[in-house]
Image: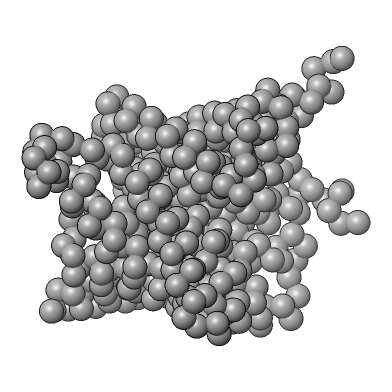
Amino acid sequence: MSLQSSPYYKALTEPILGNNPINIQMLGICSALAVTVQLNTAIVMGLSMTFVTAFSSLIVSSMRRHIPRNIRIIVELFVISSLVILTDQVLKAFLYDISKQLSVFVGLIITNCAVMGRAETYALGNPPGLSFCDGLGNGLGYSLVLVGVAFIRELFGSGSLFGLQIVPETLYQAGYRDMGFMLLAPAAFIIIGLFVWFQKAVLQKDEGKG
Amino acid sequence: MENLMGIFLNSVFVGNILLAYFLGMCSFVAVSGNLKTATGLGFAVIFVLAITTPVNWFIHHYLLAPGALAWAGLPDVDLNFLRFITFIASIAAMVQIVEMVIERISQALYTALGVFLPLIAVNCAILGTSLFMVERNYNFSESLVFGLGSGTGWFLAIVAMASLRQKLRYADLPYGLEGYGITMIVTGLMAMGFMIFSGIAL
């Protein structure tokens, strides 16, 4: 079996572009946007999210035969919150500044519907290996959108990337101004809206139109 | 009193939990298609926020904060790392209790709100408000007002959005933009509108 036809490969790559959790499944927008003013925070948030999604899918999937149906949501919540606490403590220990900037948004990964959604719809019905790949793929797809939004916002909003000045000084002297609007909340909504439009209109044209 | 008024107005308008902090987006996008259900969910969110925020304040100040267990003779214990898991558990439990009480007291209210209550347990706005309450060091009455204000702000946003989307149904949009895409863009415009209030200070 070649790499591309293996179900693991499919579970991993499909959510990155085709079935992106933010753009197509409409999940997990909640905490995504507030951290996208700078690339640094967006990347850390994306990584934490990928870690939590991948391992919560793995754990929920390995327990799927032992979880009673009625209390499955509580069990899932506890798995997810334990992982989030772990992430939060690690961030506080090693990346204190960024963890301060992310403030409550790391904690909000718990109620991020993308994590819950994958545990509910995928991990409960599939073996652990596949679920892990699915969680990893969804986390990466999520990070991709986050980084994309952050790239646009930081570049146009403060003229820098990763905190380093990109737009040259001469341009400012020639009258160029940073778009302060990009740093405000409404810009994030509009950029996501345009991303969704782009993805649906360009990437899915052949299948979507029929 | 002035301070409380300020917190309320700030959490309804300038610091709107949805439009400025992006919390509760998932259910916002999913439910704002229909004005009636949006109103129902909005009321349920106000209700649950007004209860869970003060309850979590008690949990934080008497169980979790550093030195909070002094009343039990354990002044050195710091259980802060348990904050996320305790808050989410208390929210889930409160939602369950509220659901049972409503079912018992008012059948009409239960049919109106009942379906939404389980949904609310995983709404980021609820957990987010509790976490902000801790981060901003609110006292008890402030956190009660903050919970109410956040709920009202969320209610306003979702009802306004649902009304807009009913009109949008007749708009002729380019392929790919209808539904979710345009909802996000309109939300962005609405967020701009709410920012006008930022000049107002009490």
The residue positioned farthest toward the front in the image shown: B104
Residue in the picture at 24% in, 65% down: B143
Q: Is residue B172 left or right of residue B125?
A: right
Residue in the picture at 68% in, 56% down: A197
User: Taking A84 as reference, is B167 above or below it?
Assistant: below
User: Taking A190 as reference, is A123 above or below it?
Assistant: above
Residue B193 is drawn in which quadrant? Answer: bottom left
User: Taking B24 as reference, is B3 above or below it?
Assistant: below
The residue positioned farthest toward the right in the image shown: A210
Quarter of the image with the N terminus of chain B in it: bottom left
Residue in the picture at 50% in, 83% down: B106
Q: Position of residue A57 (x, y in %)?
A: 60, 33
Residue B119 is drawn in which quadrant? Answer: bottom right
Question: Can residue A24 be seen at all in this image of the molecule?
Answer: yes
Question: Can residue A182 be seen at all in this image of the molecule?
Answer: no
Q: Position of residue A206 (x, y in %)?
A: 87, 48
Quarter of the image with the C terminus of chain B in it: bottom left
Residue in the picture at 46% in, 44% down: A110
User: Taking B8 as reference, is A45 above or below it?
Assistant: above
Q: Position of residue B160 (x, y in %)?
A: 52, 79
Of residues B96 and A108, the one drawn nearer to the viewer in this rendering: B96
The residue positioned farthest toward the top in the image shown: A1
Of residues A114 and A203, the one drawn nearer to the viewer in this rendering: A114
Q: Position of residue B2 (x, y in %)?
A: 13, 79
